[in-house]
Image: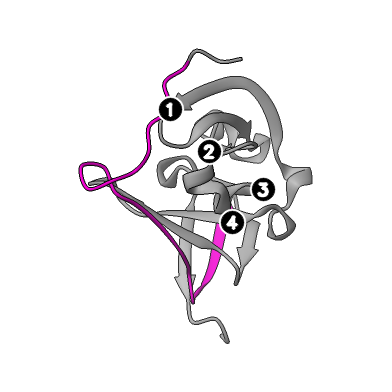
Amino acid sequence: MSSEPIMVPGPDHPITIEPNPKRVIVTVAGQVIADSTDALTLKESKYPPVQYIPRKDVAMALLQPTDHHTYCPYKGAASYFSIPGGGDRSANAVWSYEDPYPAVAAIGQHLAFYPDRVDGIREEPAGG
């Protein structure tokens, strides 16, 4: 059992998760790493919004699991992946909460990308 603190989002630290109506495309070194019309937008407190993309829409074969882990008291333990095709810049570029806390359970089986470790995270109309 983990001794890490578990905190629940609230007025002092709000977290919202909503379906993104747009198509989200992530590219690295000229390759599409993710392409989804089922992304979730997580907005946490004063941080920039983050796109969480379902694993089914990510080219998992282009990712490499790493030993890096972090902990968020609101979301849980995060596992990381590197994108070898992106070189050193793309080390630990992707994270996932494998077993997120109940308040953010919707992001389970989803991946998020650091914008500065990929070439782009583009949003465009879902039909186009």
Q: What is the CA distance from the residue labelled 2 to the residue labelled 1?
A: 8 Å
Farthest residue toward the right? Answer: 61
Image coordinates of residue 94 in percent, x first then y, are 56, 39
Looking at the image, residue 123 lies above or below residue 72: below
Marker disc for residue 53: 4
- State if disc 1 and disc 2 touch (CB < 8 Å): yes
- Mark 2: amino acid: Tyr
Which residue is identified by label 2? 101
Q: Nearer the viewer, mark 4 or mark 1?
A: 1
Instruction: Report the residue at 42% width, 47% height from top.
Output: 115
Which residue is identified by label 3? 109
- What is the quadrant of residue 106 in the picture? bottom right
Instruction: Report the residue at 66% width, 40% height from top.
Output: 85
Label 2: which secondary element: loop
Looking at the image, residue 31 lies above or below residue 18: above
Is residue 14 found inside the magenta-colored segment of the image?
yes
Specify whether 40 is left or right of 79.
left
Is residue 105 found inside the magenta-colored segment of the image?
no
User: Which one is nearer the viewer's eye here, 86 or 104?
Assistant: 104
Label 1: which secondary element: loop
Q: What is the CA distance from the residue labelled 2 to the residue labelled 3?
A: 13 Å
Tell me which numbered mark, 4 or 2, is placed earlier along the sequence: 4
Q: What is the CA distance from the residue labelled 4 to the residue labelled 2?
A: 18 Å
Label 3: which secondary element: loop
- Mark 4: amino acid: Ile
- Mark 3: amino acid: Gln
Tell me which numbered mark, 2 or 1, is placed earlier along the sequence: 1
Image coordinates of residue 86 in percent, x first then y, are 59, 39
Tell me which numbered mark, 2 or 3, is placed earlier along the sequence: 2
Q: What is the CA distance from the residue labelled 1 to the residue labelled 3?
A: 20 Å
- Identify the magenta region: 4-27
